[in-house]
Amino acid sequence: MFVSWCFAQAGCSQLIAASTAKGFAGVEVFEAWAKKNKLVIPTVQVQAGDIVLFDFAKAGKPVHVGIAIGPINPNTHLLDTIEGNTAGDNMGSQSNGDVVTLKHRALTTVRTVVRPNWSK
């Protein structure tokens, strides 16, 4: 819900209206919608404003989502995101916590990158 809330605050809910006019709650539903609408891009092309879906356990499905704040860091090879409903580093559930925070995620945790159609 955090990503949907962010887009709503920016007046851009229509760009991610996978479940309702206000956005999405389930990341699996959002991923299917993004694929259907041809909004998925290669991870290496990620840039600020893209939506990043994570599969921390490599279970074959997305379990968490965040907003990229830039491209992949060329020095650390990590992706910086802003995420809600997560936990601090190395503590608590990364996909079901109670904080909003800056995260530095390994690319191996990224399942899907979605680029909203900003021209809408």
Image: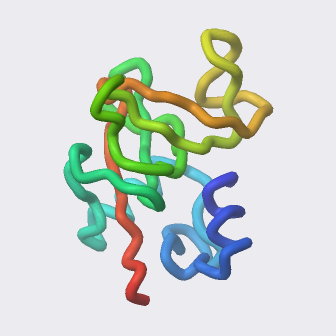
Q: Pick out the residue farthest to the right.
A: 98
Horizontal and vertical percent position of residue 110: 35, 35
* Quadrant the N terminus occupies: bottom right
Q: Give the number of callouts.
A: 0
* Quadrant the C terminus occupies: bottom left
Left or right of 74 on screen, residue 10: right
Question: Residue 50 is drawn in which quadrant?
Answer: bottom left
Q: What residue do we see at 38% from left, 87% from top?
A: 119
Left or right of 65 on screen, residue 62: left
- For the rendered model, the colour scheme is rainbow
Q: Nearer the viewer, residue 17 or 105?
A: 105
Horizontal and vertical percent position of residue 54: 43, 35
Q: Nearer the viewer, residue 9 or 102?
A: 102
Q: What residue do we see at 43% from left, 43% from top?
A: 53
Work out whether 112 lies above or below 20. Answer: above
Horizontal and vertical percent position of residue 18: 49, 69
Work out whether 56 lies above or below 38. Answer: above
Q: Pick out the residue farthest to the front.
A: 75
Left or right of 64 on screen, residue 2: right
Horizontal and vertical percent position of residue 30: 46, 58
Q: What residue do we see at 59% from left, 79% from top?
A: 12
Question: Residue 33 is drawn in which quadrant?
Answer: bottom left
Q: What residue do we see at 47% from left, 61% from top?
A: 49
Question: Residue 74 is drawn in which quadrant?
Answer: top left
Work out whether 45 lies above or below 99. Answer: below
